[in-house]
Amino acid sequence: MAGKKESTKTLATNKKAFHDYFVEESLEAGIELTGTEVKSVRKGSLNLKDAWCEIQDGEMILRGMHISPYEQGNIFNRAPTRPRRLLLHKREIMRFFGLVKQSGYTVIPLSVYLKGSRVKVQVGLCKGKKLYDKREDMARRDAKRDMERAVKERNVS
């Protein structure tokens, strides 16, 4: 039996997370949304910049993610930054909880995307970067960019 190939479409990425944190591990989670929120997310009106995850009563909660209200949603719209529950297995939540409590990690949403007809969130187990780490990354990125430009100019000539 041939399996269907699920298409994925990235709706938002958290670029600030990659700048401020080392991403040690990531996993895919479902997210509990209402109907008007799903419509708004499909339009791409969401922001992950200041979002983070916390574990409360054995559930992972996504806080700080802003989903703009749907224009045609009238009374069914919810608060834009309300806490939203992430759908993960209990084993995964407890493993992340142990690492966050003892090792100084934090859980940050990295991206939101559509997988088939479902909205998914990529959640990362992250460790904070120091200022010198950020400078190192910027220098590495600049050097790579300069090399790519030099190669491109050489190929054009």
Image (cartoon, helix red, strand yellow):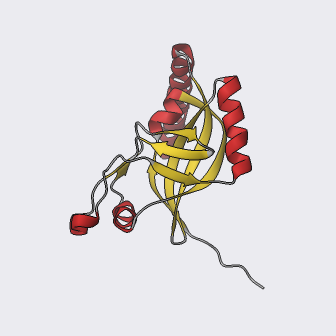
Give the camera-side residue of 126 and 35.
35
Q: Position of residue 60 (x, y in %)?
A: 57, 45
* Residue 157 visible in image: no
Is 152 drawn above or below residue 71 in the view shown?
A: above
User: For this view, does 50 lie left or right of residue 120?
Assistant: left
Give the camera-side residue of 25 and 29.
29
Instruction: Identify the residue at image location x=64%, y=74%.
Output: 5
User: For this view, does 61 lie left or right of residue 3?
Assistant: left
* The quarter of the displayed image where residue 132 is located: top right
Quadrant in which the N terminus appears: bottom right
Q: Position of residue 98 (x, y in %)?
A: 71, 33
Instruction: Identify the residue at image location x=57%, y=50%.
Output: 122
Give the camera-side residue of 118 and 91.
91
User: For this view, does 56 lie left or right of residue 45?
Assistant: right
Instruction: Identify the residue at image location x=63%, y=28%.
Output: 105
* Residue 21 visible in image: yes
Number of numbered discs visible in the structure rendering:
0
Residue at the front extreme?
A: 57
Q: Position of residue 35 (x, y in %)?
A: 38, 68
* The quarter of the displayed image where residue 30 is located: bottom right
Q: Position of residue 27 (x, y in %)?
A: 65, 49
* The quarter of the displayed image where residue 57 is located: top right
User: For this view, does 93 lie left or right of residue 46?
Assistant: right
